[in-house]
Image: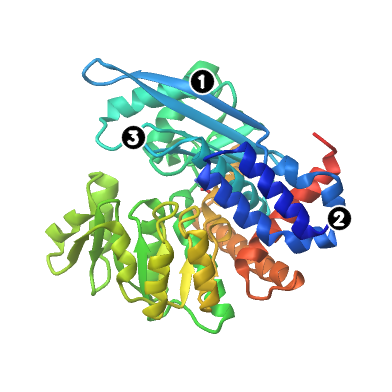
Amino acid sequence: MSGREYVNKVISEVEKRNLGEKEFLDAVTEVLNSLVPVFDKHPEYIKEGILERLVEPERQIFFRVPWIDDKGNVQVNRGFRVQFNSAIGPYKGGLRLHPSVNQSIIKFLGFEQTFKNSLTGLPIGGGKGGSDFDPKGKSDREVMRFCQSFMSELYKHIGLDTDVPAGDIGVGAREIGYLYGYYKKIKNANDQGVLTGKGLTYGGSLGRTEATGYGLVYFTEEMLNDNNTSFEDKKVVISGSGNVAIYACKKATELGAKVVALSDSNGYIYDENGINLDVVKEIKEVRRGRIKEYLDKVPTAKYVEGCRKIWEIKCDIALPCATQGELDIESAKILIKNGVKVVSEGANMPTTLDAIEELQKSGVMFGPAKAANAGGVACSALEMSQNSMRLSWTFEEVDEKLKEIMVNIYKNSKNAAEEYGNPGNILMGANISGFVKVAEAMMAQGIV
Ligand code: GLU
């Protein structure tokens, strides 16, 4: 069987078995299509059913999360943890709290996480979890009660050497604190390495907050340098205004770029003088407010309702850092028309499949999420190491390791693309490089 026949066969089985799971199917299709040359070179992977096993999560846990709101009413949410692949280490991946969360989204994220974690070069498998709980507008006490109820089930399935969750959309330091406090209480165990993204006072790592955004910029800078350019004097548009967007903005600005726009789910701000990050951090990190409040402090800036319009701004570099599917083919065409040189993904799967194709066809440099945003989880693995050793590295030590990891991810992806006959296709190279390590680990461990 040729590589193409094998991939087509597995994709059509996945379609039949996972009806209606669009995000999961998109993620599987994108990865598998780029692996065709790998199967032509390694028919032993076909014989051992590597793909059939890889597309099926090792374990999926869905559970009820009841909690009581501030008015005394009972609320019920749905909890998820998908333990996707443990071939190279304990399951590792974030928890997402957002009303859109469902089986398809958690599975797509867990699938992607498996390759992303492999790319970091660290011994971590892939997993993901979360709930359709919406933290927006909830009081601290409501968030706490939800997190405690969520953990009262999740603790049975996680562990230092089994599965190590962290944050994702809607889960930051506050939520990780509540989750960890409750885990410790019901397990009577100060297993600090069981969650990452912890606060600095109880086992968190310096640099973890910044890691995804900084890592995205380090990766993108390496890609730019490799093409004889840099962030210096470039106009940058970043969607989102959460953790990833804020620290991507900070690092890009430090490297000489001018970041002119950020967004949230309601709309975007445009500041031609360059975003004032202190104002954004006060709104988003301190007050949990909306991005349009930026205008209260910077009246010369503009606010435009509708977050997708952000891609109409002329820029050299676009960093989608909000959520999946936010950059579609229409947006890609506008970016291309306006002369964009680079699109590099801070969010997971923000660019739709047809938009990626359009960007690549037009010669735009493309940094795929599983490579470009791997800095967050890489730093989580560094947090696990520090917890095991019961010591803390300095910010500089962590940042230096992060930079080295991101540069290596770029180089390995570039080399894999060349080796498999598609030089310059970093998307394909990242998929292949991430996949081969997982496949080799699975081959070595037999049919399990
Ligand atoms: N949620 C992040 C990601 O998508 C980080 C996961 C982690 O640190 O485990 O990679």
The reply to whether the C-beta atoms of the residues labelled 1 and 2 are less than 8 Å apart is no
Dot 1 beta carbon under 8 Å from ligand 1: no
Q: Nearer the viewer, residue 102 or 147?
A: 102
Q: Earlier in the sequence, mark 1 or mark 3?
A: 3
What is the three-letter code of the residue carrying label 1?
Answer: Glu
Q: CA distance from mark 1 to mark 3?
A: 19 Å
The residue pinned by badge 2 equals 43
Can residue 399 be seen here? yes
Residue found at x 68% / y 76% = 423
Q: CA distance from mark 1 to mark 2?
A: 42 Å
Q: Position of residue 158 (x, y in %)?
A: 59, 28
The residue pinned by badge 1 equals 153
Dot 2 beta carbon under 8 Å from ligand 1: no
Local SS, label 2: helix
For the C terminus, the quadrant is top right
The crowd level at tag 1 (other Cα within 10 Å; few <14, some 14-19, many 20+) is some
Would you identify the image quadrant in which residue 136 lies? top left
Residue found at x 39% / y 25% = 77
Q: Nearer the viewer, residue 250 or 33?
A: 33
